[in-house]
Amino acid sequence: MNRLPKRIVIGIILFTFISIFLSAAISYYINREIIDSSNPWIINDIKKLPETSVALVLGAMVWEDGELSHILLDRVNTGIELYKQKKVNKLLFSGDHGRKKYDEVNAMKKYAISKGVSVEDIFLDHAGFRTYDSIYRAKNIFNIKSMIIVTQSFHLNRAVYTAREVGVSAIGFPSDKRIYIHHYVNHIREFLARVNAYLDLHLLTKKPKILGPKIDITGSGVITHD
């Protein structure tokens, strides 16, 4: 079997290394852009949060028995805290309810009601399959122009950046209440997710798989319940 000429082998190796280096450099630039652009809009002190109409609480894993994972539990509890301190009037729970046997948003609703949130003040977005979908739908389905986004710190920059890029005046409030399992994995995954979000916003300009009719966020959330 004939071997490739040495110069071709060296060229392939150099091309591979240059491609890896450029990909890493671009990914780093995108991450810095998202973090630096969104940091001014993240507030850690609840007392300094402005009052607004709605908090978008982003979904996460729900266990088979319907219990909220720690990450989701802390997000919902943070949303409830904003509601009870009258920083927001409505809670929009956005998550994955694309399968009959898997339902993030109704689990979030059930827990919030058990903690004293009025059923009419809870809106459900059953098609929040990704952060981008949740935020796009918050603007285009629920007609939200300003909101507080609730999620963990590792996720918050991407969420706030996405919201402000699609035209929503968003402030981020972190829901970290503990150190989570897979802490470092979450940060590595988020590094890659920020790149994907940037591409969605500026190059691919995707729309969510599911849209639907407009819903008045100032009314009763019961209309979104099933």
Image (cartoon, helix red, strand yellow):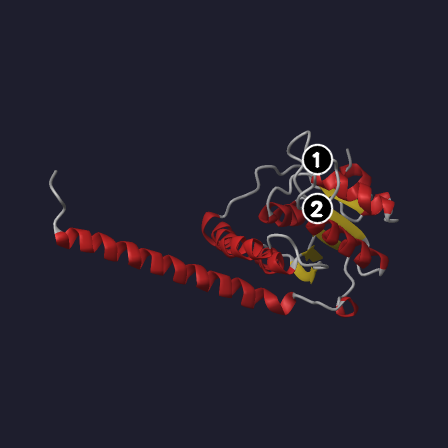
On the image, the x and y values in percent for residue 96 come to 65, 39
Between 102 and 165, the one lying in front of the other is: 102
Q: Classify mark 1: helix, strand or loop.
A: loop
On the image, the x and y values in percent for residue 35 come to 55, 64
Residue 86, image quadrant: bottom right
Residue 183, image quadrant: bottom right
| Residue at 64 percent of width and 43 percent of height | 128
Quick one: label 1, few (<14), some, or many (20+) residues within 10 Å?
few
**Of the residues under marks 1 and 2, which one precedes in the sequence?**
1
Between 51 and 22, the one lying in front of the other is: 22
List the residue tagged with mark 2: 69
List the residue tagged with mark 1: 64
| Residue type at tag 2 | Ser
| Residue at 65 percent of width and 37 percent of height | 212
The answer to whether residue 122 shows anywhere in this view is: yes
Between 133 and 153, the one lying in front of the other is: 153
